[in-house]
Amino acid sequence: MQKLQCLSPIDNSIYVERPLATHDQIGCALDAASGAQPAWRHTPLAERVAIVRQAVNLLIDRKDKLGAELCWMMGRPIRCASGEILGFAERATYMADIAESALADIQLPDKPGYTRFIRREALGVSLVIAPWNYPYFTAVNAVVPSLLAGNSVILKHSAQTPLCAEHMVEAFAEAGLPAGVFQYLHLSHGDVEQLVRAPEIHHIAFTGSVAAGTAVERAAAGRFIPVGLELGGVDPAYVRADADLPQAVASVVDGAYFNSGQSCCGIERAYVHESLFDEFVERAAALLRDYRLGRPDNPDTNLGPLVRAEAADFVRGQIDEAVAAGAVAHIDTGAFSLDRRGTPYMAPQLLTNVDSSMRVMREESFGPVLGVQKVRDDSEALALINDSDFGLTAAIYSRDEQAAMALADAIETGTVFLNRCDYLDPALAWTGIKHSGRGCTLSSVGYEHVTRPKSFHFKST
């Protein structure tokens, strides 16, 4: 029997081991999801909402235990690990709050002799494929709207965070969700592709790498079903000459290095006006020198390991190439005792004298490094921001909201922030362009991607 093993980045020990689903178990899950969905679709929306709210409450009650598991599974410092459950609750609660209005029939102007409206119908069975870096955050974006819309859901979580899928399904079952409506499967990559092709699947929501998203899209080709792809980014920040510099530095540093830089919408490149550049770099480097790299189960640690040694060495390779090409590294990594090649423990790094030819400014690093480039004006910053294959989020720091709005209109991205970054407001559409993917989750717009419109045109007799 094939098994899944979660190796903890803390000490490389086996933290979780689970058997992978067999083909018979996958078939049973598909049958159960298909069989349960019609009744769930016709369950009154108020009952569906009540079950979601109860499941959220159950997960909140367990947030400390779940946070400790996150710490061991993917390395997030224990001091902030349980906060992800509160974020899960925020998003799920908002989507429950707006479900009635978002899923209501669309009424049209009266036309004598006719009844006309558009109804949003459930798609059927949703397959949600979630990653390890924010395993509850990313899963909730698709799982809860899909369930509230009347779909059944099969959740496939990363092999690094398998317990998250188990706990989510367990909480919804305890909250009263009927059997078969929400299930998880631990799967190999090959079985995921087979599941994507399964005729019982009517919708796919994937979060992960561009390469994996390409594989999902290829597997779904010709099926003509909605496929949502959230594929990360190399997200920029622009600090204008009129920015509140201390606030901008604190925000950009947190947005770049929180979760050891392992965030889809984390800041990976910064463009700073030449009048503020030197002070920005000085302040940012000072903050980073105070970071405490260590075991994430130590409450004093605020920078934990990356998920795997290979991930850390990939980022080190980007840094080494950039320095060889002329970049300047501002952090002495030797001051961080745990930083060693071949381990997931990696000190933060800040680079200047960087440019767009360097991998560290073009590729998704997914690690604790930030390249900072000096710019003359808004035009130069805009050109550099848009010179990317990705477009998930971008952040502007400025006191001039009108100027920021003009820039925001011209930036090629899914979300633009002003004076903040690295945050998902559930009232706003979460979406990306270019290699950051397609589709949408969260907000009322997100419900359009887990339903299909059906028009009713009745002529009176």
Image: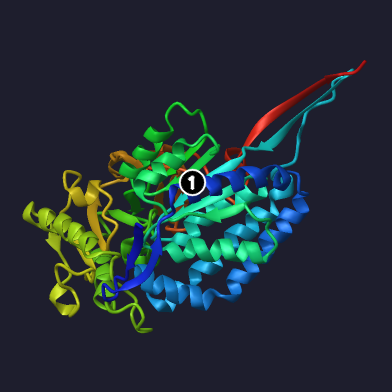
Label 1 neighbour load within 10 Å: few <14, some 14-19, many 20+: few
Q: Amino acid at mark 1?
A: Gln
Instruction: Name the element at disc 1.
Output: helix
Quadrant position of the N terminus in the picture? bottom left
Comparing 12 with 86, the one in front is: 12
Q: Position of residue 113 (x, y in %)?
A: 89, 17
* Residue 424 appears in view: no
Q: Position of residue 154 (x, y in %)?
A: 53, 50
Q: Is residue 149 left or right of residue 129?
A: right
Above-or-below relation of 15 to 423: below
Quadrant position of the C terminus in the picture? top right
Above-or-below relation of 99 to 332: above
- Mark 1 lies on residue: 402
Comparing 186 with 431, the one in front is: 186
Comparing 119 with 396, the one in front is: 119
Residue lying at 34% horizontally and 50% vertically, measured from the top left: 235
Above-or-below relation of 408 to 89: above
Residue lying at 24% horizontally and 56% vertically, measured from the top left: 372
Question: What number of labels is visible?
Answer: 1
Residue lying at 45% horizontally and 26% vertically, measured from the top left: 222
Rendering colour mode: rainbow
Q: Position of residue 295 (x, y in %)?
A: 30, 79
* Residue 342 appears in view: yes
Above-or-below relation of 435 to 139: above
Residue lying at 38% horizontally and 84% vertically, measured from the top left: 299
Q: Residue furthest top?
A: 461
Q: Residue furthest right?
A: 461
